Amino acid sequence: MGAAVETFYDVIRRQGITRRSFVKFCNLTAASLGLGPVAATEMAHALETKPRIPVIWMHGLECTCCSESFIRSAHPLVKDVVLSMISLDYDDTIMAAAGHQAEAILEETRQKYKGQYILAVEGNPPLNEDGMFCIDGGRPFVEKLKEMAADAMAVIAWGACASWGCVQAAKPNPTQAVPIDKVIKDKPIIKVPGCPPIAEVMTGVVTYVTTFGKLPTLDRQGRPEMFYSQRIHDKCYRRPHFDAGQFVEAWDDESARKGYCLYKMGCKGPTTYNACSTVRWNGGVSFPIQSGHGCIGCSEEGFWDKGSFYDRLTTIRQFGVEATADQIGMAAAGAVVAGVAVHTAATVVKRLTSGSHKSDS
Amino acid sequence: MTHKQDMLRGVMDAGDNVIVTGPSIYVYEAPVRLWHWVNALCITILAITGYFIGSPLPTMPGEASDSFVMGYIRFAHFSSGQVLAVAFLARILWAFFGNKYSRQIFYLPVWEAAWWKGVKRELRWYLFLEKEPYKYIGHNPLAHAAMFMMFTLFNLGMIITGFALYSEGAGRGSLPDQAFGWVFILFPNSMDVHTIHHLGMWVIVIFAMIHIYAAIREDIMSRQTMISTMISGERQFRDEREG
């Protein structure tokens, strides 16, 4: 655990990286976080003087897609993040230690870095049956999570699972899986939603927290504003087709080949806050809309329960019937039209049969 | 002048017969009438454009730079929505200055037994169980309930959800975001806000259908004017009997 007191700068110099490259890295990272040139200097200073922050990475109910995404980060390379910038002391899916050795690290970190380490949580805890649906190290994950959160400086909620609940919390949610902010109430939580989140967004958040030792500015829903303040729709390169009213109407039609807007195919870009349309994926190669498929809104709350990925209007499920707002509205309006017609007829009949006329009154 | 002559309003038809009318009362002052018709226009535009935002028109041919269909539809929707909101604010203000009928749509007198009795009586009238309805200067109690529950509340809800959705395009930190962004604390996924806004539109459309039917029916069947009252502001009664 001695490595944790080294600074980032010490480590990279030992790895043979020049000061020139280090300064370049600081400038690039500052720019990618949307910060000014002064921040680059601050960042360099911080990385030279501050000890590396220990990070504990826990896994609850999840599919490890967040880790898979994270290890593919290109700017900065995840190797740099894991081996140099942070002191990733515990991550059960990629660490060498196992069993009691691994468990011992958790205990050690808690004692040695009380209130100083970052707890990164991938996945979420199920609460039903006292948390028995996710056993980690011989006991319910929810217990371990609460324990480690109690002494953390801050908590990072990786992905849709930890942030919103994701698929395991989708209806009917038999294990009663809940996002971590339902369990951890007394610590600041940074939500980094997405299924998975973009690799560069993940490393960007880690870089920010470790560099400045504070949380990035969060929006109302606890997400870092630098990556989640705009919708996919706001920066989508197909947006001009939306404004023009040019839509893909069916897969493989002429409009699809021309790359028109996927709104009618159920694209959730207009309701999804994420950086996909700017940062993109796999080192900036592409993102779903660019490859011809609508956004499924994976970084939004409860995205599994908002109807089909391929319909623009979400369905509402009530009394075992699924219908869109329009179907419900038109049925109700139809019933009112029928009611009005019957009422009119009844009024006419009543008037004719009663023989009452204006002149009578 | 005799009392009889006093009642004659001097309106004559071709046969020189003088027509006797009932008493007339000024109910809806000019700002209320203006608001009503501005609202009718805005709601019509909002419902149509809103429907086409949810289910857009068939795709446009040509270059993207040649058309701006969704852009214009959304512009019409947003501008009508803002007019509707400003009109609603002005209408709330007018409730403080106008006559007592200008305040009617903003509350339900649920604490008044007479009002409940009136609701019951009006329901019986619509179920053909009463021979004739009572006369009312303002809204009848049943209309009053429908107006408050289906229009005032939903109009307010549509303004709130509408501005919340507008704030998404206006951007973080913008005025709509600061004023209405809290909606997304209640409903974190804006898809839900879209769906609620959509359902609210249908409630108001259904309200409008019932409203127009009832206005026409009561104009014919009741003992007072309905439609012309919202044009001239004058409510005329067709008889002078009590009750």
Image (cartoon, rainbow, N blue to C red):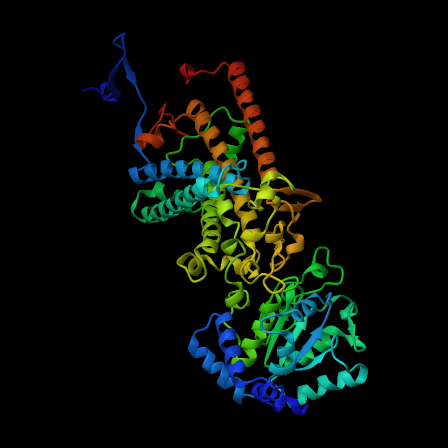
**Residue A318 located left or right of residue B83:** right
Q: Quadrant of residue B175?
A: bottom left
Closer to us: A11 or B1: A11
Q: Position of residue B121 (x, y in %)?
A: 50, 33
| Residue B203 drawn above or below residue A183 | above
| Residue B87 drawn above or below residue B139 | below
Outermost residue, left side: B1
**Residue A102 located left or right of residue B33:** right
Q: Position of residue B188 (x, y in %)?
A: 56, 59
Looking at the image, can residue B114 be seen?
no
Q: What residue is rendered at 49% in x and 38% in y?
A: B62
**Residue A244 located left or right of residue A82:** left
Q: Position of residue B119 (x, y in %)?
A: 50, 37
Location of the N terminus of chain A by quadrant is: bottom right
Closer to us: B140 or A196: A196
Q: Position of residue B231 (x, y in %)?
A: 33, 30
Q: What residue is rendered at 43% in x and 76% in y?
A: A37
| Residue B133 drawn above or below residue B118 | above
Closer to us: A129 or A232: A232
Location of the C terminus of chain A by quadrant is: top left
